[in-house]
């Protein structure tokens, strides 16, 4: 299986149509995709699995929100809206196009769960395309769902693969690993045969009539009763397993609620504090604006007097030059002389004389007392206007600065509160004591169900033992008729076939376990610096041994074990596929196998730099095609250098945020800065190719 292209359309964090070219070549098997936390790496990883199987991994939140939030919000009610993922790939020379999509008529404000539709198209070597009706079956024949977890995975999930968290109660084995191996070898068909053969035996045995042989008939009826009892007990075990799983989910849900409550308390306090600070900032903002209005209402006219003061002063200066200001004599004094027609010196100034005419002319050049007084006052004030104008301008500038700072503070505080709101979103702040009581109740029910499951398991074991003993009695009994003896031989033959299939199952399981064990040791030794030795034991549990015994594994060691196992599974699958092609067909002895890509997120988890460098060298050798999703913190120095050497394609998940208070970011790839986080009108992610 070789991945060719992934196309996303309005799928969760990805707005519009985004295309990811997945082509690789010999010696460059890697496609590197860099993304910030929250950019959509988990969504992109799950896009592959969703296209193939229609499901998400458990760590994907709000799984019903398939359609991008912006697209959904922009869609009018009663109109339809679509989101899809298309995966193009090749397998055994045939090209396939898998499209999984949802089309919804919007009837509510919020998205609701919807069943996606699947279209699988096969393109032959002649270019002819045809739709495959049983598309899901074809997909799972190419890449069985049981192998999904080993080829599409989160690095942190691989850390848990062998940490003991995935064991099922009462089985004592790593069930996920065993089931994957059975799928890899196509041993499930043998197991189904082993389950069906006892039915054949019972059907044969039932053909003996009690009149022909009452003893054999009695034994046959007893085996039927045992089979019925076993079927009922197995059904009860399945029911109890479902209950255990349901109770576990309830406990986990309550644990999350408890954690959210513990986290919510300080977050809520922080939010309350931010709200108070925002209110105070708004009050200051209003105060500054009020101050601005007051300044403008009282002194705004000064803005209109620019140049008038200068002109007034110039006019005064000109009048002074003409000796009009200050006036040498008052007009009222001249008017008194003209009225009395007598100068202060005693000389007569009669009307009609030259002296009278001269004084009368002089009267209009003389100053009015009130005009001169007002003029002097205006003139004095004009000299202060410029000084006052500068003073008001400084006050308005300071006021504008205060308003701007208040605006910035409000924006910053509101952005911080929005971030807290996002953290609080969906948190159901409940009474912690009530949650604890509910947890105790479900934990108790889970324990009771586990005990009942174990009891049912013991009863099944007892029934099987009784069934085997009854079968031996049936086969060893002396048949009373030729028909009875013939049926006894047929039943014995069926049991011999059953025994042979058990032996084949054991041999082939051990063969692949041995192959996996050797490959795990090989990969692990190339990465791990300590002299520890991994071992895949008979129960398919992966252990880590030291000179003094079984090691107590750290988180990093578990993750390296997981990566080593992925490499081992890839290698064994490839070998099985090669053997199948050499023999020209698949058989029970060879299994199906296959050449599979690996798509992984967070390949380094929390490993230190030394292990990151070693893994970055080992990753390209895991398989012929590897798509790796990396954060900026995981793509530095020697790690990035090692990965780039194996890269045929590189992409960046560029995040756009409407929070313009958040800083924009870049990532350095090939010695140049590439946009990583940018401002936009709404939250979304786009795939951008990096030129090598």
Image (tube, rainbow, N blue to C red):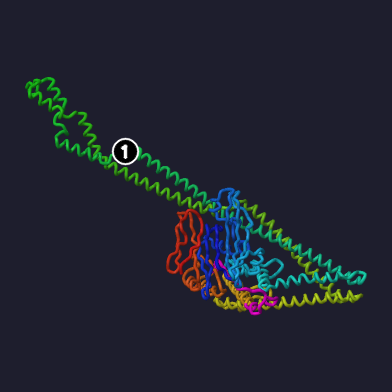
Range of magenta residues: 578-606
Q: Position of residue 443 (x, y in %)?
A: 69, 59
| 604 magenta-colored | yes
Between residues 463 and 140, which one lies in front from this camera angle? 140
Q: Quadrant of residue 454?
A: bottom right
Residue furthest out toward the right: 211
Is 315 placed left or right of 529 in the picture?
left
Between residues 154 and 369, which one lies in front from this camera angle? 154
Between residues 337 and 137, which one lies in front from this camera angle? 137
Q: Position of residue 392 (x, y in %)?
A: 32, 42
Q: Position of residue 619 (x, y in %)?
A: 54, 73
Residue drawn at x 29%, y 41% is 388
Dominant secondary structure of the magenta stretch? loop
**Where does label 1 land, which residue?**
301
Query: Count of labels shown?
Result: 1
Is 617 placed left or right of 224 in the picture?
left
Residue 266 visible to an observer of this rendering: no
Q: Sort mark 1 into few (<14), some (14-19) or many (20+) by Cα contacts within 10 Å.
A: few
- State whether residue 293 is above or below residue 221: above
| 301 magenta-colored | no
Q: Quadrant of residue 675?
A: bottom left
Residue drawn at x 52%, y 50% is 271
Q: At numbered mark 1, what does the secondary structure look like: helix, strand or loop?
A: helix
Is 402 placed left or right of 461 in the picture?
left
Q: Position of residue 36 (x, y in %)?
A: 50, 62
Which quadrant is the N terminus positioned in? bottom right
Residue drawn at x 21%, y 31% is 373
Q: Quadrant of residue 351?
A: top left
């Amino acid at each position: 299986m070789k991945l060719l292209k992934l196309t996303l359309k309005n799928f969760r964090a990805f707005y519009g149509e985004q295309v990811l070219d997945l082509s690789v070549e010999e010696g460059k098997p890697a496609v590197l995709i860099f993304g910030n936390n929250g950019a959509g790496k988990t969504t992109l990883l799950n896009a592959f699995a969703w296209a193939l199987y229609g499901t998400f991994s458990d760590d994907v939140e709000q799984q019903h929100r398939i359609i991008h939030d912006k697209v959904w919000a922009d869609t009018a009610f009663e109109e339809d809206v679509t989101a899809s993922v298309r995966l193009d790939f090749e397998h055994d020379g045939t090209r396939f196009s898998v499209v999984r999509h949802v089309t919804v008529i919007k009837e509510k404000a919020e998205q609701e769960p919807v069943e996606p539709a699947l279209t699988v198209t096969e393109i032959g070597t002649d270019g002819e395309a045809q739709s495959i009706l049983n598309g899901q079956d074809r997909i799972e024949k190419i890449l069985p769902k049981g192998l999904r977890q080993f080829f599409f995975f989160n690095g942190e999930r691989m850390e848990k693969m062998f940490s003991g968290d995935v064991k099922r109660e009462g089985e004592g084995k790593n069930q996920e690993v065993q089931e994957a191996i059975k799928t890899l070898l196509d041993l499930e068909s043998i197991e189904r045969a082993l389950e069906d053969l006892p039915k054949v035996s019972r059907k044969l045995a039932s053909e003996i009539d009690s009149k022909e042989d009452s003893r054999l008939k009695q034994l046959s009826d007893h085996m039927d009763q045992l089979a019925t009892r076993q079927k009922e007990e197995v059904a009860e075990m399945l029911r109890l397993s479902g209950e255990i799983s349901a109770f576990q989910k309830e406990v986990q849900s309550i644990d999350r609620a408890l954690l959210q409550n513990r986290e919510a308390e300080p977050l809520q306090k922080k939010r309350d504090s931010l709200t108070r600070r925002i209110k105070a900032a708004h009050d200051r903002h209003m105060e500054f604006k009020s101050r601005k209005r007051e300044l403008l209402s009282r002194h705004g006219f000064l803005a209109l007097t620019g140049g008038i003061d200068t002109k007034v002063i110039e006019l005064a200066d000109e009048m002074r030059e003409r000796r009009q200001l200050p006036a040498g004599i008052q007009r009222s004094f001249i008017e008194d002389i003209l009225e009395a027609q007598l100068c202060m010196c005693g000389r007569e100034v009669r009307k009609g004389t030259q002296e009278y005419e001269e004084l009368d002319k002089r009267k209009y050049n003389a100053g009015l007392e009130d005009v001169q007084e007002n003029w002097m006052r205006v003139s004095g004030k004009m000299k202060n206007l410029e000084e006052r104008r500068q003073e008001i301008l400084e006050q308005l500038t300071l006021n504008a600065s205060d308003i701007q700072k208040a605006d910035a503070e409000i924006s910053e505080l509101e952005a911080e509160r929005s971030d807290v709101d996002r953290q609080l979103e969906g948190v159901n702040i409940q009474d912690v004591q009530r949650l604890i009581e509910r947890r105790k109740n479900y934990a108790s029910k889970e324990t009771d169900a586990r005990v009942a499951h174990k009891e049912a398991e013991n009863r099944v074991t007892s029934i099987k033992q009784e069934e085997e003993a009854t079968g031996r009695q049936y086969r060893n009994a002396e048949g009373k008729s030729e028909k009875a003896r013939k049926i006894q031989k047929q039943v014995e033959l069926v049991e011999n076939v059953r025994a042979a299939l058990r032996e084949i199952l054991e041999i082939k399981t051990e063969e692949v376990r041995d192959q996996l064990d050797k490959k795990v040791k090989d990969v692990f030794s190339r990465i791990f610096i300590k002299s520890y030795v991994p071992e895949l034991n008979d129960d398919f549990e992966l252990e880590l041994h030291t000179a003094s015994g079984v090691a107590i594994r750290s988180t990093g060691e578990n993750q390296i074990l997981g990566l080593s196992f992925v490499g081992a599974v890839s290698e064994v699958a490839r070998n099985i596929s090669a053997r199948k092609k050499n023999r020209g067909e698949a058989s029970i002895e060879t299994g199906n196998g296959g050449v599979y890509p690996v798509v992984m997120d967070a390949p380094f988890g929390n490993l230190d730099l030394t292990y990151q460098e070693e893994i970055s060298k080992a990753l390209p050798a895991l398989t012929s095609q590897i798509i790796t999703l990396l954060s900026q913190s995981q793509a530095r120095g020697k790690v990035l250098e090692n990965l780039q050497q194996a890269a045929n394609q590189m992409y960046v998940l560029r995040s756009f945020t409407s929070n313009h208070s958040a800083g924009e970011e870049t990532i350095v790839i090939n010695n140049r800065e590439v946009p990583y986080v940018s401002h936009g009108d709404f939250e979304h992610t786009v795939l951008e190719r990096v030129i090598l």
